[in-house]
Image (cartoon, helix red, strand yellow):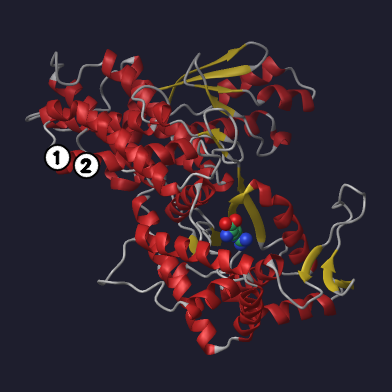
Amino acid sequence: MASVTSLTASVHQRLADALSAALPEAGSADPLLRRSDRADFQANGILALAKKAKANPRELATQVVARVESGDVIKDIEVSGPGFLNITITDRAIVANLAERYADGARVGVPLAEHPGTTVIDYAQPNVAKEMHVGHLRSAVIGDAVVRILEFTGESVVRRHHIGDWGTQFGMLIQYLIEHPHELDHKGGEVSGEEAMSNLNRLYKAARTVFDSDEEFKTRARRRVVDLQAGEPETLAMWQRFVDESKIYFYSVFDKLDMEIHDADVVGESGYNDMLDETCRLLEESGVAVRSDGALCVFFDDVKGPDGNPVPLIVKKSDGGYGYAATDLSAIRDRVVNLKADSLIYVVDARQSLHFKMVFETARRAGWLNDDVKAHQLAFGTVLGKDGKPFKTREGETVRLVDLLDEAIDRATAVVREKAEKVGLSEPEIEENGRYVGIGAVKYADLSTSAVRDYKFDLDQMVSLNGDTSVYLQYAYARIRSIFGKAGERTPVAHPELELAPAERALGLHLDRFGETLEEVAAEYAPHKLAAYLYQLASILTTFYDQCPVIKPAPAQEVAENRLFLCDLTARTLHQGMTLLGIRTPERL
Ligand code: ARG
């Protein structure tokens, strides 16, 4: 695998060398290189450095220009304004650099991280016996993208689906199932995810009705909670049936989302039951947690209720029960000690931020988190309806995730069908593309705004062919593929000796930035920056098409080959980038 030094990096290095030659006391100062409209790059760092050294910025800039090793990379470098540098790259360097990327295959020259670590990421965590809603969509989509991005950088990633599979609510459900033993039976073999969920829903409603009206059932249900906690075998076996049934449903939804979830990574709340006692003991012995009104609590100076009294994190309730916090603290120990993580990521709704703030701080006090092991909540905002309020059905109920996905697929299939004849798609291809476009649209809408922000779920906008949508990107990709269908004898060949048109240079310089973009995206867990990069790539490609014919009118042989080469590298970059977002790129659309 050949990782490629980007043009930005090599210009940066040349400037930094010239700078330290011109101003030795600046050491390895940063010339602050940016892409620019005036030239290819602008360096803005000299101003501040000159100021610090009490030198004249224009003079310093002039000296840097005099000392810079242009090689065959820098075509032109000039001082502008009070001490900026405008830098233009040679056409040869652009094409030669892209040719190296092209030779690297699917990775397109993107280097691996120098010091990869181990990240445990907690995402896609629905709750047993409950319908999945848009909140679960966000966690799954963002988490899946971050997993792919981190793995692409060489990080070892351990996935944890912290499903809600434990708690007092199971007493009622288990008791009901014991009294109505056939409620979850699978008549006639396998059930679909939809059927599994509808069985669970029916059972839940029925159990709730009896629970609310029958005092004796209520008592039996409460006793059942005690049995469950004591690990009584029959009770546990019944509980397992709820988990298994729910998993059939979860997997069907993840499958619809075109997402791979592995059974071994589903470690729900119950997976930490054996650690809870010890977690509490460690916290109490170290004085991190204290007894307060019979409960085991951790206090924080800056967490107070509306009445001004401190609100503690309750690790163990006064009745001896463990809650969400004890599980999360135990999970941290497991992830740090057993899984050897150095980064923990939690892709969880921003409304749980206070919980994670308190949990992380507790873990730091206990020494489980420290400078070498960091935890980060990748908090996401709320999905809103078109009216700007949290997304609900007209009846005010939360929207079922499957319904949303099905609608997106239907809309997308209609969009695909419109062009299908022209492209020559068969019915199965229309349906497959409909799924890829529909699911891609939902994922892209979720990933293209920064995670913490709320966004509006607007299917019309999501499947629109114009604008910042996945379909636009998918069309850009398919369009390149169709060019190759028409290319005949001509094949992609890099020609560094050619002079480039402005649109070719713009495309080349943007392709060069893929690796740096990914580095930033991975470091900040910010898939939206990758989405923005890809959207820009597709837009630049559109300009390139307008200005630089590839097939018709036929340009000179070398020009055509070089353009095909640019197209092919763009297609690979789009494909790789979209794959990292979990979005498919159909060959024909
Ligand atoms: N199951 C929870 C929910 O649906 C999310 C779990 C988040 N992860 C965690 N480690 N607490 O809200």
- Mark 2 crowdedness (10 Å alpha carbons): few <14, some 14-19, many ≥20: some
Q: Which residue is mark 1?
A: 427
Picture quadrant of residue 229:
bottom right
Q: Which residue lies at the image location 35% right of the left edge and 47% below the top edge?
A: 107
Q: Does any atom of ligand 1 lie closer than 8 Å to the CB of label 2?
A: no
Q: Is 320 situated above or below 130?
A: below
Q: Kindly report the distance in space between the C-alpha atoms of the residues bearing marks 2 and 1.
A: 6 Å
Q: Which residue lies at the image location 73% right of the left edge and 61% below the top edge?
A: 359
* Residue found at the very far right of the displayed protein: 308
- Mark 1 crowdedness (10 Å alpha carbons): few <14, some 14-19, many ≥20: few
Q: Is 269 situated above or below 60?
A: below
Q: Which residue is mark 2?
A: 431
In-front residue for pair 431/50: 431
Determine if residue 573 is in view: no
Determine if residue 256 is in view: yes
- Taking the image as shown, residue 61 lies to the left or right of residue 267, namely right
The percent position of residue 544, horizontal first and vertical second, equals 30, 19
Picture quadrant of residue 16:
top right
Q: Amino acid at mark 2?
A: Glu
Q: Secondary structure at mark 2?
A: helix
Is the residue under label 1 in contact with that under label 2 (CB below 8 Å)? Answer: yes
In what quadrant of the picture does the C terminus appear?
Answer: top left
Q: Quadrant of ligand 1?
A: bottom right
The percent position of residue 330, horizontal first and vertical second, equals 66, 72
Q: Secondary structure at mark 1?
A: helix
Q: Which residue lies at the image location 73% right of the left edge and 35% below the top edge?
A: 25
The percent position of residue 59, horizontal first and vertical second, equals 68, 16
Q: Amino acid at mark 1?
A: Glu
Q: Is 41 situated above or below 322?
A: above
The percent position of residue 29, horizontal first and vertical second, equals 66, 35
- Taking the image as shown, residue 34 lies to the left or right of residue 329, namely left
Q: Which residue lies at the image location 33% right of the left edge and 34% below the top edge?
A: 98
